[in-house]
Amino acid sequence: MNGSEFVMRALAANGVNVCFMNPGTSEMRFVAALDAIPEMRAVLCLFEGVCAGAADGYARVAGRSGCALFHLGPGLANGLANLHNARKARSPVIALVGEHTTSHLKFDAPLSADIAAFAQTVSDSVESVGSGGELARAMERTIANAGRPPGQVAAIIIPADISWSSVPGEIPRAPAVVRTMPDDTRTAAAADLVRKPGAWILLGGTALNPRALRSAAAIEQRTGARVAIARNVPKVASGRGLFQPPQVPYFPEKAIEFFGSAENLILVEAETPVSFFGYPEMPGCMIPESCRTFQLARRDEDGTAALEALAERCGALRSEVLISDPAPVASRASGMLTLDDIGATLAVMMPENAIVSEEAVSSAAVLLKHLRSAAPFEWMPVTGGSIGQGLPVAVGAAIARPDRKVIALEADGSGMYTAQALWTMARENLDVLIIIIANRRYAILDIEMRRAGVSEMGARADAMIDISRPELQWTAIARGMGVDGVRAETVEDFRKHLCASLKERGPKLIEAVI
Ligand SMILES: Cc1ncc(C[n+]2csc(CCOP(=O)(O)OP(=O)(O)O)c2C)c(N)n1
């Protein structure tokens, strides 16, 4: 077996049977190997940022490792921003990177680059395979590293000559490592803390599933401790019937106010909350200086089981949990479309079990407020602050769960970073509804400008935030990549298009102009 076939068979044997690819000359043998390995599904993406984000979305939804294949250093470099987001999400992602043949490395040929240096910026583990004899063990370590809780980007760099030469060794089976449960002493200590005034519980990582949320609700209702969701979490179960604690606000003033009463913060697969950016005269840490933190479950531990154990200790596990669902806000019957109309209409129409890839940026808060009354869904926000994640993550999610509707809530500026994802959605006929929030600006930067004390922007500064000239034609962009696109400027249009698209399967884009 040659090296590339070995790699593909090793991945498939370990349950990694989807690979998002953008290959080049040095990866030709990987492409050729696909014909012999039907159990490996290869998905072509037209930009590496899409491969990386799709592998992340796949991992978050499938609950197992995603995989992406990149062409040498430059190909990997194009994928770095979304690998960065995957790293922050703690998604298990295997990055396969082709390298020049070992004998060619000395020439500093045009595509030569320090691949390991690029990979190290986003990966906790980087394997550079030096010979065919090293491949089996390197693959085993890579697969194991990616999947080891809490999950990581694990890169493996494979020279072309190793991919085409026969390699020794058995197909490895990487041992699955399960999350461990924090010991009793930690649960006991947390049980003391939650009963005290000023106790807060911050949920992150995988502890945002219905079981974890139910336990958190029971603890809150029994003890009075307050529960919050960390920012930049990979996936949250939301909607009617579920406990929907508030999320830590984005801007530091609000976040500091939010935690104002906190005396003890119990962290469940979460870290001490810090603001996204540093601002003059503003602390970076969002909890009061006097507030103590206590790690009930680390990012690599089982936060769900820890919450259950804590609920049990508080005598709350079997108690009834009261969930008061917010009443849906009726959307207006007609008029020019606003964010509230989009949110209210979506909240009523969104099908149960939808997966929402959300990159709505300045529109997120309003949309998510409405979606609190929607049928249960899973929400996946941007994790690492690097925009261009939403559409690729939707690709991966739709491949992981073809039985569920995926809805991408996408800001128009962010959507342009990785618009090529639309082509993969069309080619694979993925069941994704893309709603582009077309506000024609980098609107969040308007807010940041005001925060920077600039009350009146000059024309030159405004030109860096205004994206209306020329106006992006999202319906044409979509059609050009094989996705049916429609535009909605009124409430009536939006409702009509949403209703029609939710009845259909396959990719569809609505440009919602606000
Ligand atoms: C990779 C990357 N480049 C640039 C930025 C800086 N940035 C943050 S938000 C933003 C513009 C967002 O505009 P849009 O997606 O249209 O959303 P809106 O603010 O209008 O809601 C930019 C450029 C970033 N976060 N990540």
Image (cartoon, rainbow, N blue to C red):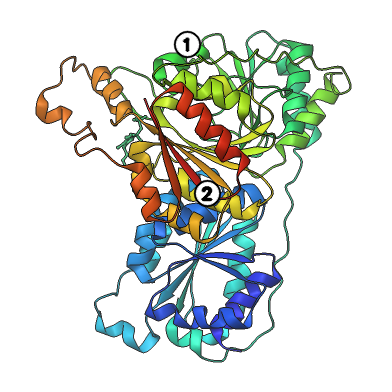
* Quarter residue 192 falls in: top right
CA distance separating discs 1 and 2: 42 Å
Secondary structure found at label 2: loop
Identify the disc placed on residue 507.
2
Question: What residue sits right under mark 1 in the picture?
Answer: 257
Task: Determine the residue positioned at 30% across, 21% down.
Answer: 447
Secondary structure found at label 1: helix
Closer to the camera, 410 or 136?
A: 410
Is 334 situated left or right of 205 in this image?
left
Is 155 situated left or right of 374 in this image?
left
Residue neighbourhood size for the residue with mark 1, other residues' Cα within 10 Å, grouped as few (<14), some (14–19), many (≥20): some
Is 64 situated left or right of 285 in this image?
right
Is 397 situated left or right of 281 in this image?
right
* Quarter residue 452 falls in: top left
Image height check: is 436 above or below 110? above
Image height check: is 310 above or below 153? above
Image height check: is 500 above or below 253? below
Image height check: is 177 above or below 6? above
Q: Position of residue 505 (x, y in %)?
A: 61, 48
* Residue furthest out toward the bottom: 166
Q: Which of the two labelled residues, at mark 1 and mark 2, occupies the earlier sequence position?
A: 1
Residue neighbourhood size for the residue with mark 2, other residues' Cα within 10 Å, grouped as few (<14), some (14–19), many (≥20): many
